[in-house]
Amino acid sequence: MNTIEALHDRSGLRGLAYAAFAYIVFILTIVYSVAFLGNLMVARTIDAAAVVSLGKAFLVNSGLLVFFALQHSGMARKPFKRWLCRRMDRRLERSSYVLASSLAILLLMALWQPMGGVVWSVTGPVVAALIYGFYFAGWALMLHATFLLDHLELFGLRQVWAAYRGIDCDASKFKTPGLYRRVRHPVCLGWLMVLWASPVMTVTHLLFAAGMTIYVFIGIQLEEHDLLVDLPDYRQYRRKVPMLLPSWRKYLR
């Protein structure tokens, strides 16, 4: 093996390690998020006891939501991607986005301030179980939707594997498999299910759910603006397929 090949192998291995690390952090973030938002099996959840004043908690939490929204959408915009790719291998851009987004949501959960107060509370065990079923169904829907497209590419793994093998990794062609023929954004639909499916809705949970819901709709508009520019077929797809809720009219005729 000559010197150039050795350097290429080391660079490729570093890229693989970086992407694997980003993906592991993402998986751990998802696991903790399930417990944090569902008040399950972790010491501190979204509905933990309040420790600061209501006003201070509101300001801190609102700031955390804004920070996450700016990071999550800001890094997805083309100008930032171009800036980042001038400073690192372009095939690591997606893994960097995944890592930064995971760290942003971990920071949000770590610094989130409970606020106390109950908006609604479901005490019936059957109804509460159904709500929790809806909650976990939302997480399952998000995961399933990533595999319908290309899970490995979405989280940056395919790009670095192609780089390690020395082959090109072209962007996936526009396609609408499975759920994407019913709604344009099944991942966002699953996230909305997660946000609002809670048998006990506290004030702090309501702030989180409302803030994230507003961000979902803003994020969709930003994403679709880019898709309309990049994908000639997307305009017709947007006219035919609902954004979040499937239409059953043609089945009811």
Image (tube, rainbow, N blue to C red):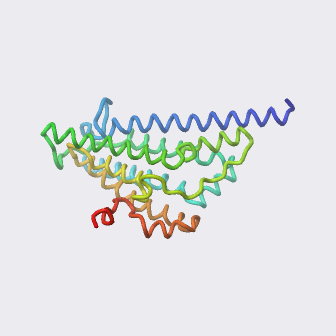
* Viewer-closest of 157 and 66: 157
Q: Is residue 13 left or right of residue 72?
A: right
Q: Is residue 15 left or right of residue 73?
A: right
Q: Nearer the viewer, residue 176 or 100?
A: 176
Residue most toward the left? Answer: 124
Residue at image position (18%, 49%) is: 119
Q: Is residue 161 left or right of residue 175?
A: right
The C terminus: image quadrant: bottom left
Q: Height in image: 230 above or below 143?
A: below
Image point 34% across, 49% down: which residue? 61
Q: Nearer the viewer, residue 228 or 214?
A: 228
* Residue at the limit of the structure toward the front, as seen here: 253
Residue 17 in the image: state x and y as whole percent.
Answer: 63, 33
Q: Residue at x 35, y 49 (%)?
A: 60
Q: Position of residue 213 (x, y in %)?
A: 34, 56
Q: How many marks?
A: 0
Q: Image height check: is 216 above or below 15?
A: below
